[in-house]
Amino acid sequence: DAGVIQSPRHEVTEMGQEVTLRCKPISGHNSLFWYRQTMMRGLELLIYFNNNVPIDDSGMPEDRFSAKMPNASFSTLKIQPSEPRDSAVYFCASARVAGVFFGEGSRLTVL
Amino acid sequence: TQLLEQSPQFLSIQEGENLTVYCNSSSVFSSLQWYRQEPGEGPVLLVTVVTGGEVKKLKRLTFQFGDARKDSSLHITAAQPGDTGLYLCAGVPFGNEKLTFGTGTRLTIIP
């Protein structure tokens, strides 16, 4: 079975540009999480969805960040405009009762 | 604010030695999970403990959930170089799925 699929794996962009990260969760999983990982702050939960509905977005840093889940098989995390402090690895994870499964992450560098 | 504190933050030991990693919180969790993360990859779930006082074993790894459901430990017996990685605990609160990660322990096993 395919795991959680994230794209792009790496993105380098300039400050002010829009960034869109994509995630395809594992089929049948009804919860989806977006995390950000940095050396300084570790793994931070940004937002999570249950049955495509955003449940808790209190971890979203500011209005520049937005996330959508238009259907059970796709989610996006958008940063507009991007800033250098947004540089991090962004992980998507999906879950069912058995546990949480992470994608390989999208490494974002904002110059 | 980090709800889950792990100690030690870094640990480097010789192959064959034993070690214990701790995960502590002032919050009570319905369950607690342990993950291992290797460079360039997402965290991989090792175990979930759900009952206060529960002990689970996974080969040379022993996981314990504290009686008060606020803390957990991971003990590795006869560490191997393949155990090298970032170990993360994560707590699930009662009533929701907001999985919050600890600060992490970076373990290095020296051959």
Image: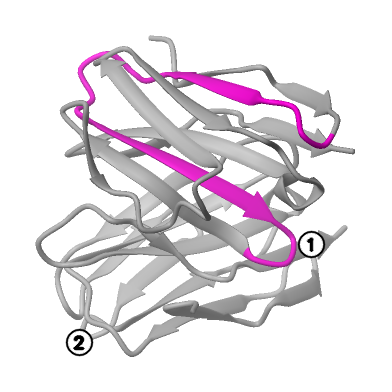
* Residue for point 65% across, 82% down: B8
For disc 2, the neighbor class at 10 Å (few under 14, some 14 to 19, many from 20) is few
Q: Which mark is residue B73?
A: none
The quadrant where residue B110 appears: bottom right
The quadrant where residue B49 appears: bottom left
Where A86 sits versus A61, above or below?
above
Which residue reaches farthest left?
B95
Does the magenta portion include B97? no
* Residue for point 16% across, 56% down: B96
Q: Chain of mark 2?
A: B
Magenta stretch in the rendered image: A15-41
Q: Which mark is residue B109?
A: 1
Q: Chain of mark 1?
A: B
* Residue for point 50% across, 30% down: A77
In the foreground, B7 or A56: A56
In the foreground, A52 or B36: A52
Q: Which mark is residue B67?
A: 2
In the image, residue A40 lies at what x, y percent? 73, 67
Mark 2: secondary structure: loop
Mark 1: secondary structure: strand
The C terminus of chain B is located in which quarter? bottom right
Where B68 sits versus A110, above or below?
below
- The type of residue carrying mark 1 is Ile
For disc 1, the neighbor class at 10 Å (few under 14, some 14 to 19, many from 20) is some
> Mark 2 or mark 1, which has the lower sequence index?
2
Where A29 sits versus B98, above or below?
above
Q: Nearer the viewer, mark 2 or mark 1?
A: 2
Q: Is residue B81 left or right of residue B20?
A: right
Q: Is residue B102 left or right of residue B87?
A: left
